[in-house]
Image (spheres, rainbow, N blue to C red):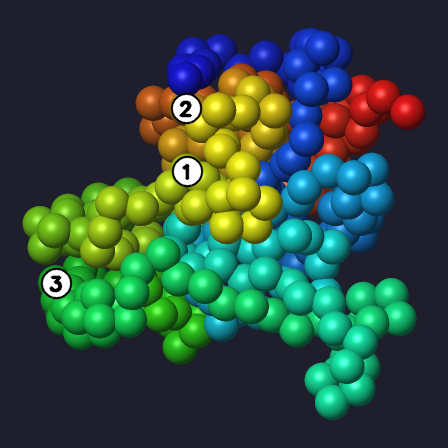
Amino acid sequence: MHTARTMLPLAAWPLADRQNIIGVFTDIDDTLTTDGAITPDALQALADLKAAGLHVVAITGRPVGWSEPFARLWPVDAIVAENGAVALIPVISSDDEHENSLFPRGNKHCLLSKIYLQDAVVRADHFVRMQAVAARILREVPGAQLATDTPGRETDIAIDHSEFSHLPPEAIAQAVHIMQSEGMTATVSSIHINGWFGEHNKWVGARWIVRERWGRDLDAESDRWAYVGDSTNDQVMFKVLANSVGVANVARFAPELTHRPRFITPAERGRGFAQAAQAVLAAQRP
């Protein structure tokens, strides 16, 4: 495991480490996206990574419902949503009865397989309990609002702190405290405060999807995967993966990060992701 006290410039990423990489995990909000939308250079970077034969997985605190169109349209192997609890895996089919011309993948068509880390009984129990916690937060934390993507959430709750409304640090801390006092895991992303029941997180989700998608053991090959992120809910990935990269806007969270990324890009958000991807691609052997 790697705890970075000082973030090194991206140019310091050793060539030998980059040559060894077989897959890239990435956060979405403020890593792939800029002002709420994926940038053309970030989208092209995803395509270039896939074209080079690398595995590409987005791992996000966003809900599974919100993630569905992106799992269809983006050149990724999977999107792991809700901080590791549910995954969407594109499935290519040429069966005419499944044709959906809105989401073409080459000359075939993309369906999605949705899988869950927890079983249906556990999810149903947790859902009821989470709604009670959300109601408490809305009552007790001044200015607290549910994230606008709440209808797409199945396994967690999210409070908006910087997407469409603003919460001061003390209100964010209060919401986190309430979640934790109710037995929930709580994290803070660049836009939301997320809470859920269970021990999973982005790292657990990464291990799970690598096993489910490819039958591989991520623990045994963690030095062969890179992660790109931007905020405090990414630090579990920064901690475990030595090939961890923060886009430049991660600097705003640096004082709060116990585990910082090993490297930092010159540019912020989508452009920074494109720079990280290019560093990986430049090292790939023909």
The residue lying toward the viewer, choosing from 168 and 248, is 248
Q: Residues within 10 Å of mark 3 (few under 14, many from 20)?
A: few
Is residue 267 in view? no
Secondary element type, mark 1: helix
Secondary element type, mark 3: helix
The CA distance from mark 3 to mark 2 is 33 Å
Q: Residues within 10 Å of mark 2 (few under 14, many from 20)?
A: many
Which mark's residue is nearer the viewer, 1 or 2?
A: 1
Q: Tell me residue 131's x, y (percent).
A: 20, 72
Q: Are marks 1 and 2 in contact (CB under 8 Å)?
A: yes
Quadrant of res 165: bottom left
Q: Identify the residue position indicated by label 1 in the image.
A: 203
Residue visible at 45% across and 32% down? 237
Q: Give the amino acid at mark 3.
A: Glu
Q: Give the amino acid at mark 1.
A: Trp
Left or right side of 80 for 281: right
The residue lying toward the viewer, choosing from 189 and 59, is 59
Residue visible at 87% across and 65% down? 106
Is residue 44 in view? yes
Q: Identify the residue position indicated by label 3 in the image.
A: 140
Which circle's residue, 1 or 2, is located before the other in the chain? Answer: 1
Q: Identify the residue position indicated by label 2 in the image.
A: 239
Question: Is residue 238 shown above or below 65?
Answer: above
The CA distance from mark 1 to mark 2 is 9 Å
